[in-house]
Image: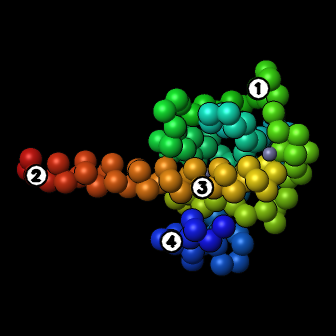
Amino acid sequence: MPAADRQRPRSDFTDGQPTIRCDECRSALRSDRQQAVSFLLLDNLTIPVLSCDDHLERFTSICGLTTEASADLLDHRPAGGIICPSCRLAPYSSTRPAIPIQDGVIVPIACPEHHSEIVQRFQTGLQTHRQLSASLSTTANGSL
Ligand SMILES: [Zn+2]
Ligand SMILES: [Zn+2]
């Protein structure tokens, strides 16, 4: 769906994989152990994701801006399991598009449908975040 393409900076996506400057992200991606996987709970979504703790936290808080409820991060499989059967079967693949975040990346291990959904939520959250920090810095400058 090209509709979401309006203002997305594409440079990081050109080769499918962004440059990962965060060592912790790199080692999280390199390990294929199940323990490295965390689970992002967002509304009715349960998305297994791979990244380092710092970037997972940031990703979660940005995705949380797109929901009235809160986004949660689990480091173990949630009690209800992964609801979507396709996500449950999704293999970890390094060819799957990663989501660049600051100097690291997030790799959702989800079916294509939920993969693109979480990417969109993140993009939306980023825009909200930029607006919030823009208005915050305007206020700060005004008070100086
Ligand atoms: Zn990282
Ligand atoms: Zn799915």
Mark 3 near mark 4, Cβ–Cβ under 8 Å? no
Residue 41, quarter of the rendered image: top right
* Amino acid on which the number 2 mark rests in the picture: Gly
How many angstroms separate mark 3 from mark 4 (CA)? 12 Å
Please state the horizontal and vertical placement of residue 106, each as a whole percent of the image: 66, 53
How many angstroms separate mark 2 from mark 4 (CA)? 31 Å
How many angstroms separate mark 1 from mark 4 (CA)? 35 Å
Relative vertical location of residue 75 with respect to residue 22 in this rendering, above or below? above
State the residue in front, 92 or 66.
66
* Amino acid on which the number 3 mark rests in the picture: Gln
Please report whichever mark, 2 or 4, sits nearer to the chain's N-terminal start: 4
Residue 14, quarter of the rendered image: bottom right
Of labels 1 and 3, the one closer to you: 3
How many angstroms separate mark 1 from mark 3 (CA)? 23 Å
Ligand 2 rendered quadrant: top right
Identify the mark at residue 140; answer none if there is no mark.
none
Read off the residue under disc 4: 6
Identify the mark at residue 78; answer none if there is no mark.
1
Ligand 2 near label 4 (Cβ, under 8 Å)? no
Please report whichever mark, 1 or 2, sits nearer to the chain's N-terminal start: 1
Read off the residue under disc 2: 142
Please state the horizontal and vertical placement of residue 89, each as a whole percent of the image: 91, 45
* Amino acid on which the number 4 mark rests in the picture: Arg
Please state the horizontal and vertical placement of residue 68, each as a whole percent of the image: 48, 33
Residue at 79% x, 56% y is 112
Ligand 1 near label 2 (Cβ, under 8 Å)? no
Mark 1 near mark 2, Cβ–Cβ under 8 Å? no
Read off the residue under disc 3: 120
Please report whichever mark, 3 or 4, sits nearer to the chain's N-terminal start: 4
Local packing at callout 4 (Cα closer than 10 Å; few below 14, some 14-19, many 20+) is: few
* Amino acid on which the number 1 mark rests in the picture: Pro
